[in-house]
Each structure stands twice: as C-alpha cells, then as structure tokens.
Image (cartoon, rainbow, N blue to C red):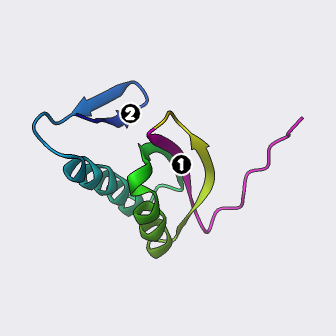
Amino acid sequence: MRKINIQDDLRIGFPGRGDTFSDGVEIGMLATMMSLGWTEFSRSISRHCLEQARALGEKLGYHIALLENDGAEAVRLTFRDRTQRPKLRLVR
C-alpha cells in the first residue's frame, strides 16, 4: 500500500487498492489545486504520475518550476502559474 501525501505532515493510504487508484488520487489532488487558481504550490507525487502531472499542468497554465527527488518512489514538484514571474534564489 502506497502512502499519498495530503499535506507535509499528513499521509494516507488506501488498503486493498492498487497503485492505479493511488495515481488517480494524486492526479485528482493536483487538478483540484490547479482549478483553485493557486499561483504556486508544491506536491510530492509518485514517479509514475510525473508525465501526467506535467501534461495536466501545461493544459491548465502551470509549469514545473522545481523538480527534486523525494525518496526512491516519489518526486517533489513545485507548480507555478505561468503569469507569475520566476523567483530567483542565490546558489552558492
């Protein structure tokens, strides 16, 4: 059973459900956040959902600003509305 990240400190699982169900929940959560019109948000999702998340973001006017490994099976994505200017950060 895979755990799905709801918030940074809250994860849930669906016993008896397969990975396909969990992928659907993750993509559904991303679609909900995008439809709320948030200018920027970050999510940890399964690597299996990465391409679908990118396609959904593109269709709804978002781009992925940051991509990090978040464990062996997950990646952390930051979605930013295309109308927002990029945030610059100092790298040392």
Indicate the amino acid at tag 1.
Leu
Q: Position of residue 28 (x, y in %)?
A: 28, 56
Residue 56 position by quadrant: bottom left
Q: Name the element at disc 1.
A: strand
Q: Residue furthest bottom?
A: 59
- Tell me whether the residue at label 2 lies in contact with that at label 1, contact meaning CB atoms closer than 8 angstroms: no
Measured Cα–Cα span from mark 2 to mark 1:
13 Å
Residue 34: % across, % down: 41, 60
Residue at 31%, 29% (x, y): give it.
Answer: 11
Residue linked to disc 2: 7
Q: Would you say the magenta stretch is mainly helix, strand or loop?
A: loop
Residue beneath label 1, please? 77
The disc label shown at residue 66, or none: none
In what quadrant of the picture does the C terminus appear? top right
Specify the quadrant of the image occupied by residue 37. Answer: bottom left
* Magenta stretch, residue numbers: 73-92
- Hey, which residue is sitting farthest left in the picture? 16
Residue 62 picture location, percent across and down: 53, 65
In terms of sequence position, does the residue under pointer 2 or pointer 1 come before the other? 2
As drawn, is 17 to the left or to the right of 9? left
Q: Secondary structure at mark 2?
A: strand
- Asked if the magenta segment contains residue 71, the reply would be no
Q: Quadrant of the N terminus?
A: top left
Residue at 28% x, 36% y is 2
